[in-house]
Amino acid sequence: MTLQLSEREHRLFEEWLGEEFGLRFGPEKREILRSRLEPRRAELGLDSFEELYFHLKFHPARQEEWDRLIPHLTNNESYFFREVGQLDVLSSEIFSNVRDRLEKSGRRELRILSAACAAGEEPYSLAMLAHDSGLFPAPWSVRVTGVDLDPQILDRARAAAYTSNAFRRTDESLKARHFDRVDEERWKIKPAIREMVAFRRANLINESWTREIPAQDVIFCRNVLIYFGEESTRKAVEGLYRALVPGGYLFLGHAESLSRVPTRLEAERRPGAIFYRRPDRNG
């Protein structure tokens, strides 16, 4: 018999998950939330979701308990070179604009952030694009940082090994150039690209994460805000603003917009892509 998530239990989890992680599970997602919580409840042998709630809130090792729960709550579906229209704008226009700005500043390092990077497909895609652009040869360097809430998915990202599902939009010549075949099912990112990418944990609604990395030239935060409530979205967007250099670029998912979010970021449009910029210091 399926154990139901009561209305009261749903409210307890909805409030807690919103406060801690920004995740929104409204009334329409009650059954989805139940299905996400059930594996951990069953594993612990608890009789109700209320017991699971208090276990997660007050267990002495609650941080470890949260780490075990988070993989069940987040959506880590991704693949290489997703939403190609944005990537085309990045390659054809933004890389050269950023390089020009960096040359004037004297900095010879391109910094890109992939927020909610999942298993690493996006940050490695961005590293490959920067590498193949030819705009950042030595002594230039490219530093791509992937951040995510889920510690288990970050371990997978660091392993950098992928199966065919991750290559649904990957050109075969690019795959041959940047991947080594491990076995019949898996391909691994070559060292030259892996060395450009680092991973770390971050909670996007906690303002402290932006103090742990240098300001970024480009940020990708795609298909993340759609899972956040209004206040969590505001906090996340403010953090993304702080994480950008003046004049830096922010890309969101195609279904996401900042039109209802108070922000100083300015929207720009190109064929097939919308992105946002932090204004320059002088404008």
Image (cartoon, rainbow, N blue to C red):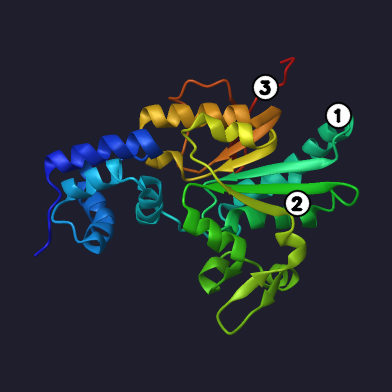
Which quadrant of the view contains residue 3?
Answer: bottom left
Residue 228 visible in the displayed image: no
Lateral position of residue 15 relative to residue 62, left or right: left
Disc 2 designates what residue?
130
The three-letter amino acid code for the residue at tag 1 is: Ser
Q: Earlier in the sequence, mark 1 or mark 3?
A: 1
Q: Can you give x and y, in whole percent of width and height, for residue 276 in the image?
A: 60, 31
The disc at residue 105 is 1
Q: Can you give x and y, in whole percent of width and height, for residue 165 in the image?
A: 51, 70
Image position of 204 with respect to 74: above or below: above
Image position of 196 with respect to 211: above or below: below
> Farthest residue toward the front?
60
Q: Can you give x and y, in whole percent of width and height, for residue 77 in the image?
A: 46, 58
> Farthest residue toward the bottom?
184
Image position of 1 with respect to 134: above or below: below
Tell me the residue at 15%/49% (across/down). Answer: 5
Q: What SS does tag 3 mark?
A: loop
Residue 32 visible in the displayed image: yes
Disc 3 designates what residue?
279
